[in-house]
Amino acid sequence: MPKERNQEVWKYYKVDKSGIKRLRKECPRCKGSFLAEHKDRRHCGNCGYTEFKTKDQK
């Protein structure tokens, strides 16, 4: 049986000639996990860190 590859992780990165860019914001506490995007906030599922969005950021 072939190994299954998780291709969902590639939607968080953009690869071009200049290098690799992360598309989502990283958690300032965890330094390695991405913040989940919600309608009114960004949340880290690992440590519970939450940033609330303002009207300018929406």
Image (cartoon, rainbow, N blue to C red):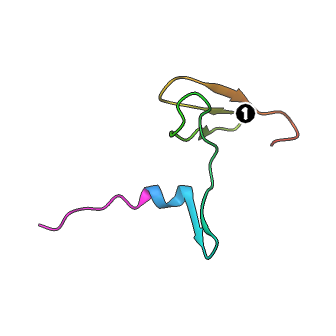
Going by the numbered disc 1, the residue's amino acid type is: Asp
Q: Is residue 21 above or below residue 29?
A: below
| Residues packed near mark 1 inside 10 Å, few (<14), some (14 to 19) or many (20 plus) | few
Q: Residue at x 60, y 24 (%)?
A: 49
- Return the x and y of residue 53 as percentages of the image width and height: 77, 33
31 lies left or right of 3: right
Task: State the residue lying farthest toward the right.
Answer: 56
Rendering quarter of residue 43: top right
**The stretch drawn in magenta includes residue 7:** yes
Q: Residue at x 52, y 59 (%)?
A: 11
Rendering quarter of residue 16: bottom right
Q: Nearer the viewer, residue 38 or 20?
A: 20
Q: Is residue 58 above or below residue 54?
A: below
Q: Residue at x 55, y 41 (%)?
A: 34
**The stretch drawn in magenta includes residue 22:** no
46 lies left or right of 15: left
- Return the x and y of residue 45 as percentages of the image width and height: 50, 30
Q: Which residues are magenta?
A: 1-8
Q: Kindly state the secondary structure of the residue where label 1 is placed.
A: loop
Rendering quarter of residue 15: bottom right
Q: Main secondary structure of the magenta part?
A: loop
Task: State the residue lying farthest toward the top.
Answer: 48
Q: Is residue 57 above or below residue 40?
A: below
Task: State the residue lying farthest toward the front.
Answer: 18
Quadrant in which the C terminus is drawn = top right
Query: Which residue bears the numbered disc 1?
Result: 40
- Return the x and y of residue 6 as percentages of the image width and height: 35, 58
